[in-house]
Image (spheres, rainbow, N blue to C red):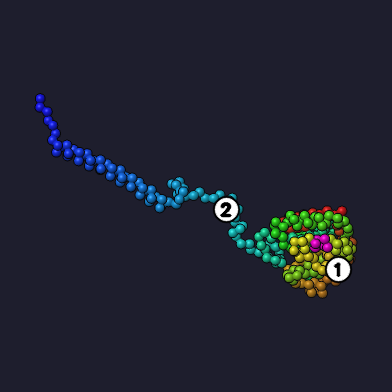
């Protein structure tokens, strides 16, 4: 039997060939590893940290209800005087500011409203157009500005200051012309003739609360009155000299005897923004 033995040169060739194959496999592994690392690096360059494939997709739009939550803070407030009868603000509107004042409310009867219509017709004949008051009241403070977070402590202080006030009666019987400080509105009112002393006592207590919050106090020598109607602009002189005497004569001679308005003062009110607070008197 013949047996073939490989020569040493063939063994060497085989070893060299096998070594080359191993190096090639090792090199291929390194190449693949390098490519993987490069892909990872390249991907990290193209993507923001922490983002995955799903986060790269288009985000869903926010619900309309959420968008509306912040619309008011983005849109500027436009003060349109035509929306409230041509009246001009005494101070600039600012978000978070609440116009506030203390007053006594008068709930009119039909005979009072009829009498007011007659007074307006008389003033119209003299070229003065009067608008009825939205709410008939006697002011006991100036209109001041409260920040929203002041409202609760302010009301609490008012309640404490007015806790021992007793109820009283007011009578208004004389027409008088008034204007605001800026002369942008003119008012027709009925001056208080009975109850002036009691009203001064209430104002004294309200003023203490105003001072506590560093707000304006009431007028030094107030003329308490029941506001009836108003017009835009300064018509003080014209209303006083042209038709005030005629209006007073019409009031005094009214067939229903409405020349005197009686107010039973059993509670005070504070209006701040669109909120109302009641303060019952003893």
- 16 in relation to 123, above or below: above
Residue to which mark 1 is pinned = 248
Q: Position of residue 76 (x, y in %)?
A: 61, 62
Q: Residue at x 85, y 66 (%)?
A: 191
Hey, which residue is sitting farthest front in the picture? 8
Residue to which mark 2 is pinned = 67
Q: Residue at x 10, y 27 (%)?
A: 2
Between disc 1 and disc 2, the foreground one is 2
Q: Position of residue 143 (x, y in %)?
A: 75, 63
Left or right: 55 as drawn, with respect to 74: left
Q: Position of residue 8 (x, y in %)?
A: 14, 37
Q: Quadrant of residue 70?
A: bottom right
Q: Which mark is residue 86?
A: none
Q: Quadrant of residue 156?
A: bottom right
Residue 133 visible in rendering: no
> Does label 1 or label 2 sit earlier along the sequence?
2
Q: Secondary structure at mark 2?
A: helix
Q: Position of residue 149 (x, y in %)?
A: 70, 56
Q: Tell me the magenta residue range.
A: 203-208
Camera-side residue of 114 and 165: 165
Left or right: 82 as drawn, with respect to 24: right
Would you call the spot at circle 2 few (<14 residues within 10 Å), some (14-19), or many (20 or more)?
A: few
Viewport quadrant of the N terminus: top left
Residue 7 visible in rendering: yes
How many numbered discs?
Answer: 2
Which secondary structure class fits the magenta region best? Answer: helix
Left or right: 31 as drawn, with respect to 88: left
Q: Residue at x 73, y 68 (%)?
A: 232
Camera-side residue of 20 and 82: 20
Magenta stretch contains residue 141 = no
- 254 in relation to 10, above or below: below
């Amino acid at each position: 039997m013949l047996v073939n033995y490989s020569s040493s040169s063939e063994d060497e060739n085989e070893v060299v060939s096998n070594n080359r194959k191993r190096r090639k496999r090792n090199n291929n592994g390194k190449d693949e590893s390098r490519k993987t690392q490069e892909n990872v690096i390249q991907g990290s360059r193209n993507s923001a940290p922490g983002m995955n494939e799903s986060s790269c997709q288009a985000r869903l739009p926010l619900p309309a209800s959420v968008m509306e939550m912040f619309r008011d803070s983005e849109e500027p407030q436009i003060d349109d005087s035509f929306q409230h009868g041509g009246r001009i603000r005494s101070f600039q509107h600012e978000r978070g500011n609440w116009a506030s004042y203390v007053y006594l409310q008068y709930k009119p009867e039909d005979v009072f409203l009829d009498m007011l219509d007659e007074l307006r017709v008389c003033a119209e004949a003299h070229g003065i157009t009067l608008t009825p008051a939205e709410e008939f009241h006697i002011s006991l403070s100036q209109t001041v500005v409260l920040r929203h977070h002041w409202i609760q402590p302010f009301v609490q202080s008012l309640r404490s200051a007015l806790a021992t006030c007793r109820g009283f009666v007011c009578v208004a019987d004389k027409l008088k012309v008034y204007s605001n400080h800026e002369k942008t509105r003119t008012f027709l009112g009925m001056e208080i003739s009975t109850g002036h002393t009691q009203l001064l006592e209430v104002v004294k207590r309200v003023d203490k609360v105003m001072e506590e919050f560093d707000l304006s106090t009431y007028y030094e020598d107030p003329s308490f009155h029941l506001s009836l109607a108003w017009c835009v602009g300064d018509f003080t002189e014209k209303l006083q000299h042209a038709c005030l005497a005629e209006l007073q004569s019409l009031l005094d001679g009214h067939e229903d005897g409405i020349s005197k308005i009686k107010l039973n003062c059993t509670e005070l009110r504070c209006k701040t923004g669109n909120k109302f607070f009641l303060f019952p008197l003893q």
